[in-house]
């Protein structure tokens, strides 16, 4: 559904990214990096399996790049 633009916990909308680097700095698991040519830089998931769901990226981003993924469990 989201391809490489999501982890188990968050979705990533790179169209909103201004490459400010705040999310990269707060991520303690090195999940994120700013990549791309100088005219089109944005956040990339470089270690999406390392995401622990702390949601620091969601909290620090003022541009709505990250969304919380709804996780359903069957009982």
Image: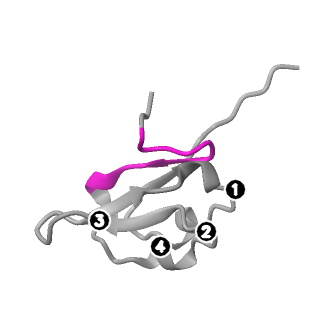
Q: CA distance from mark 3 to mark 2?
A: 20 Å
Tag 4, which secondary structure?
helix
Nearest the eye: 20 or 31? 31
Q: CA distance from mark 1 to mark 3?
A: 22 Å
Q: Earlier in the sequence, mark 2 or mark 4?
A: 4
Q: CA distance from mark 4 to mark 3?
A: 11 Å
Q: Earlier in the sequence, mark 3 or mark 2?
A: 3
* Quadrant housing the C terminus: top right
Q: Earlier in the sequence, mark 4 or mark 3?
A: 4
In this figure, which residue is indicated by the disc labeled 1? 52
Relative to 2, does residue 27 appear above or below in the rendering? below
- 27 left or right of 14 in image: right
Tag 1, which secondary structure?
loop
Please state the extent of the stretch shown in magenta in the rendering.
4-15
Mark 1 or 2: the one toward you: 1
Q: Earlier in the sequence, mark 1 or mark 3?
A: 3
Q: Earlier in the sequence, mark 1 or mark 4?
A: 4
> In the picture, residue 45 is in which quadrant?
bottom left
Mark 4 or 3: the one toward you: 3
* Image spot of residue 60 (x, y percent): 52, 73
* Image spot of residue 58 (x, y percent): 54, 62
* Image spot of residue 51 (x, y percent): 63, 55
Q: CA distance from mark 2 to mark 4?
A: 10 Å
Nearest the eye: 52 or 62? 52
């Amino acid at each position: 559904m989201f391809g490489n633009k999501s982890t188990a916990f968050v979705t990533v909308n790179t169209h909103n990214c201004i490459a400010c680097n705040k999310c990269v700095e707060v991520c303690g698991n090195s999940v994120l990096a700013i990549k791309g040519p100088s005219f089109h830089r944005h956040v990339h998931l470089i270690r999406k399996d390392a995401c622990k769901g702390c949601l620091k990226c969601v909290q620090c981003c003022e541009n709505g790049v990250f969304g919380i993924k709804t996780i359903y469990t069957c009982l």
